[in-house]
Image: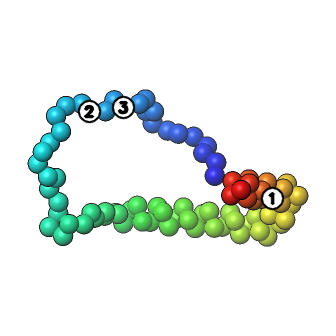
Amino acid sequence: MTVKAIEGDCTPVEPVKGKKSQAPAKQASSGKDRVQVSGEAKTLFEADQSRRMDAIRARLEQGYYMSQEVTEKIVDGLMDDLLKLT
C-alpha cells in the first residue's frame, strides 16, 4: 500500500487530563453502535469504485500487469511477506 499524501492538520493532539468519570457511559437503547451513510456518500463511493475498476480493466487489456517491472514488484512483495513468517 502506498500513501500518497496526508491532508489536514497533522499536529499531535494532547490528551485530555482530568478526573475520570465514575458514571457509566450512556448507550443507545439497543446497546449497539450505529453508522449512517448518506446517499451522496454511497454514490461517491460507487463512482470511485467504478473508476478504479475501469482503470484496472484498461491496464489488464494493455498487458500492464504482465510487464517485467510489475512482476518483480509482486515477487518482491511476496518475498517480504514470506520472510516475515520465518
Residue at x 35% of width, y 63% of height? 37
Image-quadrant location for residue 61: bottom right
Image-quadrant location for residue 79: bottom right
Disc 1 on helix, strand or loop?
helix
Q: CA distance from mark 3 to mark 2?
A: 9 Å
Left or right for 11, reference 34 = right
Residue type at numbered disc 1: Val
Viewer-nearest residue: 19 or 1: 19
Residue 5 percent across, percent down from the top left: 57, 40
Viewer-nearest residue: 76 or 40: 76
Q: CA distance from mark 2 to mark 1?
A: 46 Å
Residue 6 — which label? none
User: Which mark is in front, 3 or 2?
Assistant: 2
Residue at x 14% of width, y 56% of height? 26
Q: Disc 2, disc 1: CB below 8 Å?
A: no
The residue singled out by tag 1 in the image is 75
Spot the residue most to the left: 23
Disc 2 on helix, strand or loop?
loop
Residue type at numbered disc 3: Val
The residue singled out by tag 2 in the image is 16
The residue singled out by tag 3 in the image is 13
Q: Work out whether mark 3 precedes mark 1 in sequence or the reverse, and give the earlier one.
A: 3
Q: Work out whether mark 2 precedes mark 1 in sequence or the reverse, and give the earlier one.
A: 2
Classify 10 Å Cα crowding around label 3: few (below 14), some (14-19), many (20 and above): few
Q: CA distance from mark 3 to mark 1?
A: 40 Å
